[in-house]
Image (spheres, helix red, strand yellow):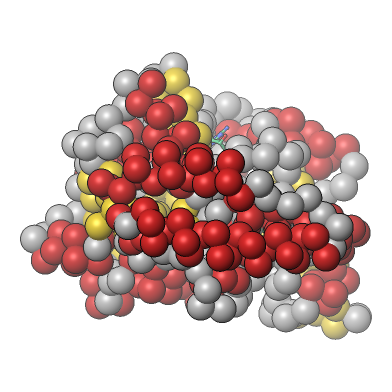
Amino acid sequence: MSSTVLFGVQWGDEGKGKIIDVLMENCDVIVRFQGGANAGHTVEVGDEKFVLHLIPSGILREGRSCIISNGVVIDPIALVEEIKGLEARGINVRNCLQISNRAHIVFPYHKLADAMKEDAAKDKSIGTTRRGIGPAYSDKASRVGIRMAELKNIDRLESLYREQAALYNEKFSAANCETLDIDSAWTELKEVAEILAPLVTDTVYTINAAIKAGKKMLFEGAQGFWLDIDHGTYPYVTSSNTSVGGACTGAGVAPKHIDEVYGVVKAYTTRVGEGPFPTELHGQEGEDLRQAGNEFGATTGRPRRCGWFDSVACSYAVMVNGIDKLAVTKMDVLDNLDELKICTSYMLDGAETKEVPVSAEDMDRLEPVYETMPGWKTSTVEVRSWDDLPENAKAYLSRLSELLDCKIGIISTGPHRRETFFV
Ligand code: GDP
Ligand code: IMO
Ligand code: MG
């Protein structure tokens, strides 16, 4: 297999960063293809913990090429901060990172617009990460976005930026909201633009040349399938295609070059931000899962909502994305439970269904139908093979695989690189 796409199957934070880092041992090139600094991908190596937002999680493997491709929206200030943070910890970034000239820029006015919209929406807010993602993708779709290519022509970048920033400030003033200090923001932008400009290139050629040369490619998704702008729990979604198709458009790669699709699932479910979550556990059970799994956002630190595994939602993701293999993470978090539940269908208005309704309102009204399985009550942290898993853990995983009609390729039983095994 030369090209693998990996993405999250639930609502994000499935452990993609960790699994990417593991798979990168045998890959040459890693491409981050959508989203922006809303992502937080955690990788633990040795005694160190890294949280990556824009830089591909393969950066921690020396000698690999890392690419941020055209489908990503890039906050240049956040990116430079991330680069400097990694370099201060001895990670070589600038020698191996390339950034697409087609990727759109997230400007400070996008972040203000994100916050303004969220604040105005009050109890109808999306619960975004406030990283300017929605406004930046909106500008891209509205054809007024500014792309990374402009970093190579500072004067042009400045005039494009000033034009857009003035328009945004008019909107902010009209809404009695905080406006952007255009001059001081420009001083900072100019500085980071100069740092990033040498890394900006046409990554579509780089990526396709690497494929042609037989390099092992890994395409890294951010967020999760149920946050996809088309397929997710709209409007409680992010603003990009987090699903497998996003890799083709977001990296400039033909579908025929994708050989394998890996879906990462947590052994239970979490969600951060607002929006429907049929298997959410309210009260003590949810709190216990949050503590056991240390479920706090890697980007915003917000507590994640926790619940049981939803096989109906995950099956839809398997169908849409043609997932070949699953990576199941955080099995160890379930080690102490007496019993576990898996949602196998929903009740909606008195009728049972195995289909996910389109509207968030209907999704909110779903009552999950659960199958209960016995827990294994043994630590799985040191387990390194399928055969060594407790019988009840095998039964749980086998049932997930059966319900999703998808093989399990990787099992993760701890945050560390070594706490992983292939099946
Ligand atoms: P991502 O956004 O999908 O990369 O996931 P995050 O990094 O936001 O969240 C996953 C969290 O779970 C991180 O803190 C990881 O270090 C941690 N993690 C990943 N796999 C495992 C696992 O198998 N067990 C445990 N206990 N933690 C894990
Ligand atoms: P990773 O890659 C979990 C959620 C936000 C919010 C919604 C829209 O770490 O899995 P946005 O800022 O994108 O406009 O917010 O999407 N969200 C994530 N949730 N993990 C993420 O990324 C997320 N990125 C965005 O909480 O509900
Ligand atoms: Mg995350």
Q: Residue 358, can we see it?
A: yes
Q: Quadrant of the rendered structure where residue 221 is?
A: bottom left
**Residue name at image x 39 percent, y 61 percent:** 156
Measured as percent of width and height from the top left, residue 232 is found at: 64, 70
From what the image shows, is residue 135 above or below residue 130? below
Return the residue nearer the eye: 54 or 375: 54
Return the residue nearer the eye: 393 or 295: 295
Q: Is residue 236 left or right of residue 260?
A: right
Q: Is residue 406 left or right of residue 333?
A: left
Return the residue nearer the eye: 392 or 234: 234
Return the residue nearer the eye: 348 or 190: 190
Measured as percent of width and height from the top left, residue 369 is found at: 79, 66
- Number of numbered labels in the structure image: 0
From what the image shows, is residue 20 above or below residue 138? above
Which of the image's four quarters has the N terminus?
bottom left
Measured as percent of width and height from the top left, residue 158 is found at: 46, 56
From what the image shows, is residue 185 above or below residue 293? below
From what the image shows, is residue 129 above or below residue 142? above
Q: Residue 19, can we see it?
A: no
Taking the image in four quarters, ligand 1 sits in the one at top right
Measured as percent of width and height from the top left, residue 344 is found at: 70, 67
Q: Is residue 172 left or right of residue 322?
A: right
**Residue name at image x 56 percent, y 65 percent:** 163
Q: Is residue 351 left or right of residue 39?
A: right
Q: Quadrant of the rendered structure where residue 238 is?
A: bottom right
**Residue name at image x 42 percent, y 74 percent:** 245
